[in-house]
Image (tube, rainbow, N blue to C red):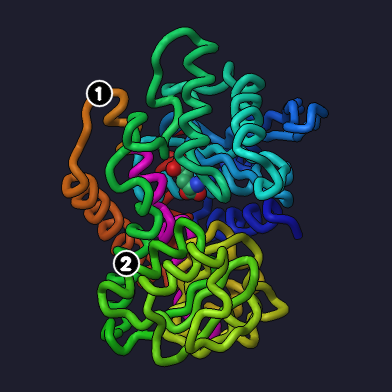
Amino acid sequence: MNAFDNAMTQLNTAAVLMNLDPSIHNILSHPERVLEVAIPVKMDDGSTKVFTGYRSQYNDVLGPYKGGIRYHPNVSKDEVKALSFWMMIKCATVNIPMGGGKGGVIVDPKELSAGETERLSRGYVQKLWRNLGSDKDVPAPDVYTTPQIMGWMRNEYEKLVGYADPGVITGKSLEDGGSEGRSFSTAQGGVYCTIELAKKLALEPKETTVAIQGFGNAGSHMASILSGLGYKIVAVSDSKGAIVNMEGLAIDVLSQHKQETGSVISFEGTETISNEEILELDVDILIPAALEHVITKENVGRIQAKSIVELANGPTTPEADKILHEKGIVVVPDVLANAGGVTVSYFEWDQNVKGEHWTEKVVLEKLEKIMVDAFNTVWANKEEYAVDMRTAAFVSAIERVAEKM
Ligand code: GLU
């Protein structure tokens, strides 16, 4: 099954439970528009390469399409469609006035120079600008895309339309109209969810062990904020492998090590394990923070974690979800756990549209309120309907979208 099939299985589960109107179910089973473009890029050696890019605009009844752009070799049309569907559910789960969208380019960004990355990013906008805009579709960063890339894209868009529209894209640098707190907001939102989860499960931070798969923007910030709160981060990983020390890792020293060597592996005092093994550690909280499809029917039987906080999008397949629920492992789903990113993106858009700049304190207070309210609403629904948290989140999100339709 591909990511979009998985997303549709999740939709169907919620639709049956909530007795969703078949017409609305049918409409929500398709993205409204999927654009595929060929982006020619002049490479540094003088040759021209053509990259395939996508933008999936799933649904905009709650507000402009919203969602990141991913640069990764495994990007596909199905993946982008699934991710845009999850963005629709995510925005509705945290109740922000944004719809669902997602973009991607099939590329290994590690093989591009800065100049090539800039030309690719501008090329993406040259092909898609007619479909973008602060009141139409608002992209943002995702896997391997950065504030710098958002800046190039904003600049290219404004050159093409001929007027300033800072809210056309979020996740920009602070100098370029970005919001305070956006750089770590995905993790911060996940932290607010983890704190609420710890209360529900009566976990004491200092005795709570955490394993984090993925040490990119979301995973590394999650590790440092949680460790600052006293949680014991015992294992982390990146694309090169995973490290573990059940006594806990000094995250600030580890971040330094990652910066110097390019990887978390071979960090002093740790044992190296694989990216599969990190998922199977006996910890209180497992945090997948990389890509989709890592907890599947193949490895779910070996998962020992007591709970899972999904910082990545789509890390758990529907078959695995069912088994985790039967085993009593609580999963805080992606559409809630990682919604801090898009929530602060919405704040950034709101500030841009109004010409305001809020302090970090204001941003974090607003974010905390939204995340804590959303967590507790989803938790209450899970209890009331005796379902897992994902289904509970889907039901209330789809209710919001359906009502508006
Ligand atoms: N890429 C992030 C996500 O998957 C953020 C999207 C946004 O800020 O629009 O939620």
- How crowded is the residue under tag 1: few (<14 C-alpha within 10 Å), some, or many (20+)? few
Looking at the image, the residue that sits furthest to the right is 47
Q: Position of residue 182 (x, y in %)?
A: 35, 46
Classify 10 Å Cα crowding around label 2: few (below 14), some (14-19), many (20 and above): some
The kind of secondary structure element at disc 1 is helix
Decide if residue 36 is on the left or right side of residue 300. right
Q: Residue 238, located in which quarter of the rendered image?
A: bottom right
C-alpha separation, residue under disc 2 versus residue under disc 1: 30 Å
**At 45% across and 59% down in the image, what residue appears?**
218
Specify whether tag 1 is near ligand 1 (CB below 8 Å): no
Q: Which mark is residue 354?
A: 1
Q: Which mark is residue 225?
A: 2
Q: Is residue 387 visible?
A: no
* Residue type, numbered disc 1: Lys
User: Looking at the rendered structure, which numbered label has been put on residue 163?
Assistant: none
Residue 243 shown left or right of residue 299 in the figure? left
Q: Is residue 327 magenta?
A: yes
Q: Which comes sooner in the sequence, label 2 or label 1?
A: 2
Q: Which residues are magenta?
A: 326-346
Residue 213 pos. (x, y %):
54, 71
The residue drawn where x is 65% and y is 86% is 301
Instruction: Examine the structure image and report whether residue 100 is included in the region drawn in magenta.
Output: no
Question: Type of residue at label 2?
Answer: Ile
